[in-house]
Image: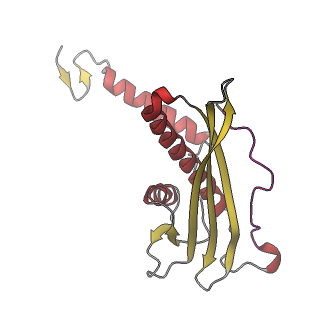
């Protein structure tokens, strides 16, 4: 059959056009029921500078902030509304031994410390930290593979920390908070729970 502009000569709608109309109808129904994409933030600051942190962390933070809000990431000398200071650390400690006293599991730990300062030096978020951990089984036979697994787990914790940090930044409601409106600092006071496998 010969087709003309998505409709064949007999007058039936083609499959691709039907799929498009179905997709359009589904989008209209979702918008009518109040569906909204997650992650849209309305930060109090519209120009944010970031100091410290690894390039990987800064790149993810830029994507998360700029992709989910109207805030832009600028250099510290470009007159930011707020400056985020980051410091991260990671470590490894023994979690369990086998009957021969050989390490069987490691606990990987990742810490992110941060503060947020306004352009006039106002402390918007006092020194705070995010602490995460993961467990990793270990064997001397697979040293290279376990090293690569540790790198993946550290990257996963770093990404998780950035996700938490973006939500924490959204708690700042004003660049000039009144004494009772200041965002409190958050630091884990208890030991980390047993890491997930």
Question: Along the line of sight, which residue is nearer the eye, 193 or 61?
Answer: 193
Magenta-colored segment: predominant secondary structure: loop
Name the colour scheme. Answer: secondary structure
Q: Residue placed at 76% from the left, 73% from the top?
A: 182
Q: In the image, is 94 to the left or to the right of 148?
A: right
Query: Which quadrant is the C terminus positioned in?
Result: top right
In which quarter of the view is residue 88 placed? Answer: bottom right
- Residue 106 position, x and y percent, is 62, 37
Tell me which corner region of the image, top left, top right, bottom left or bottom right, holds residue 97. Answer: top right
Q: Is 183 in the magenta?
A: yes
Q: Residue 113 vs residue 69: left or right? A: right
Q: Residue furthest front?
A: 100
Q: In the image, 65: left or right of 44?
A: left
Please tell me which residue lies in front, 98 or 196: 98
In this rendering, is residue 9 above or below 150? Answer: above
- In the shown orientation, is residue 94 left or right of residue 80? right
Name the one closer to the observer, 4 or 57.
57
Query: Any magenta on residue 180?
Result: no
Image: magenta residue range: 182-196
What residue occupies the far left of the structure in this picture? 2
| Residue 173 appears in the picture as rendered | no
The residue lying at 46 percent from left, 33 percent from top is 143
Placement of 141 over or under 176, stated as above or below = above
Q: Position of residue 138 (x, y in %)?
A: 56, 31
Tell me if I can see residue 187 in this picture: yes
Q: Residue lying furthest right in this view?
A: 180
Question: Which of the two residues, 165 or 99, is positioned nearer the viewer here?
Answer: 99
Residue at 31% across / 18% down in the picture?
Answer: 12
Which part of the image, by quadrant, shows the N terminus? Answer: top left
Residue at 77 percent of width and 67 percent of height? 184
Residue 169: image location, x then y, percent: 63, 63
Q: Give the percent coordinates (x, y) of residue 77.
A: 44, 82
């Amino acid at each position: 059959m010969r087709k003309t502009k998505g409709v064949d000569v007999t007058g039936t709608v083609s499959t691709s056009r039907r799929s498009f109309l179905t997709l359009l109808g589904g989008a209209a129904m979702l918008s009518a029921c109040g569906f909204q994409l997650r992650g849209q933030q309305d930060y109090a600051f519209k120009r944010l500078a970031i100091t410290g942190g690894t390039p990987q962390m800064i790149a993810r933070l830029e994507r998360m902030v700029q992709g989910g809000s109207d805030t832009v990431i600028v250099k510290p000398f470009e007159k930011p509304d707020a400056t985020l200071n980051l410091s991260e650390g990671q470590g490894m400690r023994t979690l369990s031994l086998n009957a021969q006293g050989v390490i069987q599991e490691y606990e990987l730990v990742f810490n992110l410390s941060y503060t947020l300062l306004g352009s006039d030096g106002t402390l918007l978020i006092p020194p705070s930290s995010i602490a995460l951990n993961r467990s990793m089984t270990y064997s001397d036979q697979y040293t290279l593979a376990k090293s690569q697994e540790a790198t993946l787990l550290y990257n996963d914790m770093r990404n998780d920390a950035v996700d938490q940090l973006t939500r924490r930044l959204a708690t700042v409601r004003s660049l000039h908070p009144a004494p009772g409106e200041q965002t409190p600092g958050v630091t884990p006071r208890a030991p980390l729970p047993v890491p997930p496998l």
